[in-house]
Image (tube, rainbow, N blue to C red):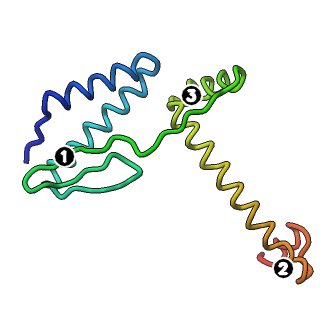
Amino acid sequence: MIVRWSERARSQVADIFGYIARDRPDAAERLLESFLERTELLAVERCSGVRDPSTVALTSFGVCSTLYDMKTGAVTIRLDAPLEKLLDKVCSKTGRSRSEVVRDALRRQLSLQLFEEARRQIIPYAEAQGIYTDEDVFKLVS
């Protein structure tokens, strides 16, 4: 199967690339590579289509597959100047986009909060068994 890009699709990808490249040329390149890799998969998978809400979604309509969804959600946050400077420093040092770094930080923070909440709920049961410290837990599991 051959994947053909419509003029509209080419124009939209060029617009997206240009917009991102103004601030982050490296991120724009990575995104463009991702688009191209995903469209190449269409040729290989022969219109099989894939729906993955965490990525660009593909769907199949008869003999052609269409790229139809380019984002899953967005959040706007305000950063104070020192935090923004730190974020930009991390992005520059790691070669990652602001979105990637913020998404990773949010994922870690939410996981930590879920862990702490689970721990708070378990503490009464642990204390009833004579388990009061992390060392008590380590003694039991090791």
Out of 82 and 139, give the one closest to the viewer: 82
- For disc 2, the marked residue is 125
| Place of residue 6 in the rendered image (x, y in percent of width and height, measured from the top left) | 13, 32
Mark 2 touching mark 3, by CB under 8 A?
A: no
Q: Secondary structure at mark 3?
A: helix
Q: Label 3 neighbourhood size at 10 Å, few (<14), some (14-19), many (20+)?
A: some
Disc on the earlier residue, 2 or 1:
1
At x 42% / y 28%, what residue is drawn?
Answer: 27
Report, in whole angstroms, how far the alpha carbon at label 2 lies from the one at label 1.
Answer: 53 Å
Q: Horizontally, is 96 left or right of 45 in the view? A: right
Q: Label 1 neighbourhood size at 10 Å, few (<14), some (14-19), many (20+)?
A: some
The amino acid at mark 1 is Thr
At x 64% / y 49%, what residue is drawn?
Answer: 108
Figure label count: 3
The amino acid at mark 3 is Cys
Disc on the earlier residue, 2 or 3:
3
Disc on the earlier residue, 1 or 3:
1
- For disc 3, the marked residue is 91
At x 16% / y 51%, what residue is drawn?
Answer: 44
Q: Is residue 123 above or below residue 67?
A: below
At x 70% / y 24%, what residue is drawn?
Answer: 80
| Place of residue 88 in the rendered image (x, y in percent of width and height, measured from the top left) | 60, 24
Discs 2/3, front: 2
| Place of residue 35 in the rendered image (x, y in percent of width and height, measured from the top left) | 28, 37
- Mark number displayed over residue 66: 1
